[in-house]
Amino acid sequence: MEVSTKEVEDAVIQFYNNPNSKKDIHTWLTQVQHSAQAWNFAFQLLDPTKTGEVQFFGGNTLYIKVSRYWHEVPKEEYESLKKRILHLIAQFANSKPIAGRLLKTLAAFILNTLSNEWPTAIEDLVTLFNPDTVTGIQPGTALDLLFTVLMIIPDELENCQETMGIAQPTRNTVRSLLRENSKGVLTLMHQVMQAAQVSNVTKEIVVKALESWLKLPLPLTQTKDLLLTLIPYSNYAVMCESVVECLRTSLAEYDSKNPQTTIDFILQLMQLNSVLEEALQADDENTASLVYGLFTSIVENHSRLLLTVALEDQGERRAAVLKLVGLLVQCSGTAGQYPTHETLSNIPFSVWYTIQEDLLTFFEGNEREQLNELFRPVYLQLVDTFLHKSLLPPDEALSAEERELFRCYRQDICDSYMYTYFILKCGMLEQLERHLHNSVARIQRDPEDWRPLEALLHAYASVAETVADSDTYYVPRFIQSIPQIPFGENIHLITVTLSTLGAYADWLNYHQDHLQHVIPLMIAGLVNEMLVGAASQALRDLTLECPVTITPFSSPILEACQKALVQFPVADSAIKERIVTIIARVLSVGVPHAAVITHLNQTLTPIITDIANIKDAVLASGSYSKEQRFQVVRQLKLLACLARHLNANVPLNEVAAPSSALELSAAPATEQPPPTSTTAAVVAEEQPLLMVLRLVLPLLEQLSATTANLPDIVEVLCKLLKNSVSTLHAEVEPLLPQIVATLKCLYYTAIHPGVLDVTKMLLMLFGQPNSSHLSELRLLVETVVNYTLQRVNNDLWNYTHVVQALLNLSTHLCKKMPHTLHPEHLHALFVLGIEALRLPEESTIKSASSFLNHFLQLSRDYKGVIYEPVVRQNTEHFLRTIITCICNSPRHSLVPIGELLYSLCKLYGGPELVAVFRKLEEDDKFMPGRIKQADKRKFATAVMGSSGSKATTAAVTDLALVSRGVAGTEYGAATAHPPPFL
């Protein structure tokens, strides 16, 4: 690219003055910055006569060239380039933006030369910018420049993986050299911080430079004395943030080699408590948040060390540790309403998890008991603090955004309650019980004083999952107190109570004698429009956890559910789904068969009537309205809930068909043929769900014909069928022909992966070689495979989910039921699997690789029959696709493709495959560009001689790096040999 300095200068000026063409100009300027000519115009743009914008662009260009294109600089020009950079820094010393870019340029220069050409760079910097000897620069400015470049150097080293071409070994060498030079740098910093004549502005730069060097990292034994000199400067508002961040960085990692130094330093940092107290008295929330944040970071990073000290030391150190943790409790209890009046109390949330996690992980037996007892007062105080801080403010006190912040804040408190319970155990329940008595007494005296009780109920709900099932003292007393609460018309309080009781569903399953205290409130809530949401949620949780123990309450629960469905016909769909779930769960256990039929008729009649009416209207008009579509999905979801949870687990029996389109009958069937599966049994009563399916399947088949281009309806229809088959298992056999017919109709109307999932379930149940339904299911498989191949041919990208589902189904058939695959489909399925490797989705690539792997295995298990010729016929296409995917697909696909290639070479690694590799190697039109013939040859040799899938995957990764042009780079090395934990 041939460009002149004048063209670049004009483009920069136009970029700032012409907002309409910024994008195009930016693209062009970026290109010229990276061109070889940039070395020439960068210095010319830094001419003193140019505008500030042009000079800044010149400085930035010079930084880009030095940091990213160092290889373009001949070694003999290093010295002259250094002198020019230093001259420019002196020239622009008083222009902060431009000097900043030039100092970054100098830092990049030093990182590129420190290990060889300029090993004394750090010492020379101190000499060059010595305020006593420097010329042309003010002494104060010289110090600022010196410590600014010292601050930049470690930061640039940290970021050089992205911005510079420094290899990892060189980076490690440079880091070691910087550590070797750190003693002199720290000494200089110490001198400057103690010099009274140096301004605080300069000292702040020193502190920032120190923080940067601490990240190398430097041992605390080397930096502790200097760090302690920073503490007095935390009283200065201008320096407080820099000082605290520096101190935080110094303790960011645990130094296992010097725990004594670490704990001594931590205890000395307690001097900051005076800074904290002054800030709190002055309402300086910013300074307080910095100090609290530092204390939080200390406990998070050194919790185990602090716990050990508290355990082993019984004097000042233990007291200091407890004081440190107590300060964080104080932070959690900051006065005022979060987040309107204060934003400090959310800072230490992570600490409460860390302490209990380390205590339970690293301490056992008597040590753990001692620590629990030691921290018991702290955590009891924390419980009281959280109960106060989680009090709901008046509704009008918070904006919508503030309410969301407070909701998240309360959730963090709920999580902290769990961590607190692990420390206090029954001590926490005892504390909550004391608050319960007080809160109930307060609301009895004043019904408006309900917020403390509401916050307390949240606390009880938070520990519900962690409370042991065997607790027979505190939780029973809490449950028994519920009827004593004077709720009145307080909807919010009742809602929270219902949610809390639902959280204890698992506990109630083991203590059924307490159900009498909670069921009445839930039933009453079901028939209250304001409470039906919370009541249905709680009762659903209860029926899921207590399927047997809830049986004595079946009648009132069912009556309340039926009333709710009638009273609230337009209720939220999630509420109705929960109510139907409750009905299904209750009807599944202990309810007489006649009562089951009665309640099912009550529940299903309006649902089926609604679906039938909409179906008729759609058939008449030819399309769904938006409301009709929504309503059908809503009603089908209710049926899907019923199908999932209505499971009496009664063996099949011959039962008569319903006496009308909307009525289920308990009378025996006379026309239904007996089941043929060996898993079916003739008993007195039929599964209720089977009767439901017999009623709705004709309607579903008719509905299926109307679902073209309506994936939401198709999805819920498939979910209904899937839930039905999952619940009934082999008992669904009498209705298998109708289900198969519905699936075919549904798939022809709207090709959907859900149909293939149900097909797979049916094959698992009835696809055995001796099954009487085998021919029927083989025909279903042929239908879906044929139709899928027709629809997705040459358009895989628009049908990725269907392709993935078909490949998953085909994989299952290859593994378990190869007898269900039609020979005519094998070639097409194999080719489909190959083409699916080109798709972008990781899950699809894994499905394709799994199918092809099993197909290859099957071809050897059935050698010489029908599978092996398919593989041999497509070997070249298979191998071409694999190599193409290696070079072009996302990185996540390399492992499954590597495993697939290993299988191919292992199972077909003879002369024919060698010949295919050689053909591709000699084909110059195949994979042109970065992939050379030698790369192909090396790759073929590696995979053909591979002794395992890991070696093949390594060869695959190497080829991928070559194709992307990053072989031999640091990124390439990290990709080819990731850390063990990845």
Image (cartoon, rainbow, N blue to C red):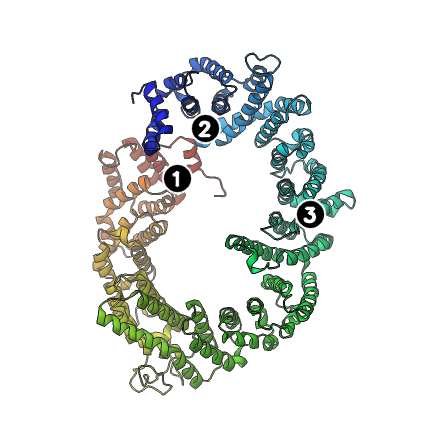
Residue 773 in view (yes/no): no
From the viewer's perspective, is the residue at label 1 or at label 2 nearer?
A: 2
Is the residue marked by circle 1 packed among few (<14), some (14-19), or many (20+) residues within 10 Å? some
Residue 575 in percent (x, y) is at 45, 69
Residue with the mark numbered 1: 954
Judged from the image, the secondary structure of the residue bearing numbered disc 1 is: helix
> Quick check: marks 2 and 3 in contact, CB under 8 Å?
no
Judged from the image, the secondary structure of the residue bearing numbered disc 3 is: helix
> Which residue is nearer to you in this view: 238 or 923?
238
664, above or below 715, in the image: below
Is the residue marked by circle 3 packed among few (<14), some (14-19), or many (20+) residues within 10 Å? many
Instruction: State the image quarter where residue 694 is shown.
Output: bottom left
Residue 396 in percent (x, y) is at 55, 58
Instruction: State the image quarter where residue 522 is shown.
Output: bottom right
Considering only order in the chain, which callout, 1 or 3, is on the residue closer to the N terminus? 3
The three-letter amino acid code for the residue at tag 3 is Val
Q: Which mark is residue 680?
A: none
The three-letter amino acid code for the residue at tag 2 is Ala
Residue with the mark numbered 2: 167
Considering only order in the chain, which callout, 3 or 2, is on the residue closer to the N terminus? 2
Looking at the image, which residue sits at the far front?
A: 396
Is the residue marked by circle 2 packed among few (<14), some (14-19), or many (20+) residues within 10 Å? some
From the viewer's perspective, is the residue at label 2 or at label 3 nearer?
A: 3
Q: Is residue 408 left or right of residue 785?
A: right
Q: Which mark is residue 325?
A: 3
Residue 48 in percent (x, y) is at 44, 16
Residue 183 in percent (x, y) is at 63, 23
Judged from the image, the secondary structure of the residue bearing numbered disc 2 is: loop
